Image (cartoon, helix red, strand yellow):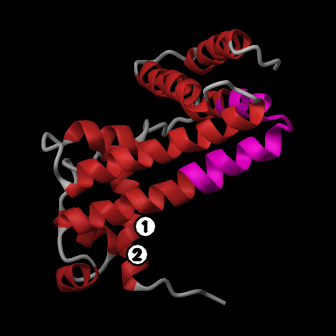
Amino acid sequence: MLLRVGARQRILDTAYDLFSRHGVRAVGVDRIVAESGVAKMSLYRHFPSKDALVLSFLQEREERWTRDWLGAEVERRAASPADRMLAIFDLFGEWFRLSDFEGCSFMNVLLELDDRDSPVHQASADHLRNIRSFVSGLAAEAGAADPNALAHKWHILMKGSIVAAGEGDQLAAGRARQMGRLLLADEGIAA
């Protein structure tokens, strides 16, 4: 039995794929319409502007990438909070080796937009804060004296390793994991 996917979901799935691989500026509405197989009027009925579509893409990315992949896999792979923090870099190592590694959509969108007051720029920053909040929760569970401070440092390692992987550093995740161990040791947290 074939499940029919509605126009809104086809548009969002197509935008997700294209925005993830090519960025939001490089992909126009006409390409999304063509590749999703929906009429332009249908796109605008569901998403009144390209910004509205980008905002939905970012929310979908948080669901698929941050919650369904990163959060779930970290929980599945490691028992202790400190080990879950380190497992982030194990996951990143696998992600970085994928032939279609596309980098962090939240970072990419944030850097593509000049207007820091735009809703899309702000949403990208919010989604990055949500990732940092996830890490802060792990840091608190691990016993960090200042979980937010550790989360900021950890998030810098995460983002830096993504950029390094984008440059072609196949060992970026392992290097970040080593630095993460040092941060945990500095906090007196065993891992």
Magenta-drawn stretch contains 73? yes
Q: Residues within 10 Å of mark 2 (few under 14, many from 20)?
A: some
Q: Residue at x 20, y 47 (%)?
A: 26
Q: Secondary structure at mark 1?
A: helix
Query: Residue 171's quadrant in the figure?
Result: top right
Q: Residues within 10 Å of mark 1 (few under 14, many from 20)?
A: some
In the rendered image, which residue does mark 2 sit on?
A: 10
Q: Residue at x 76, y 14 (%)?
A: 188
Query: Residue 34's quadrant in the figure?
Result: bottom left
Left or right of 76 in this view: 1: left
96, 1: nearer the viewer: 96
Residue 77 image offset from top left, x and y in percent:
81, 40
In the rendered image, which residue does mark 1 sit on?
A: 13
Magenta-drawn stretch contains 8? no
**Do labels 2 and 1 touch, CB within 8 Å?**
yes
Query: Is the magenta region chiefly helix, strand or loop?
Result: helix
Q: Residue at x 28, y 50 (%)?
A: 122
Residue 40 image offset from top left, x and y in percent:
18, 79
For the magenta stretch, what is the residue range?
66-88
Q: Quadrant of the N terminus?
A: bottom right
Residue 62 image offset from top left, x and y in percent:
49, 55
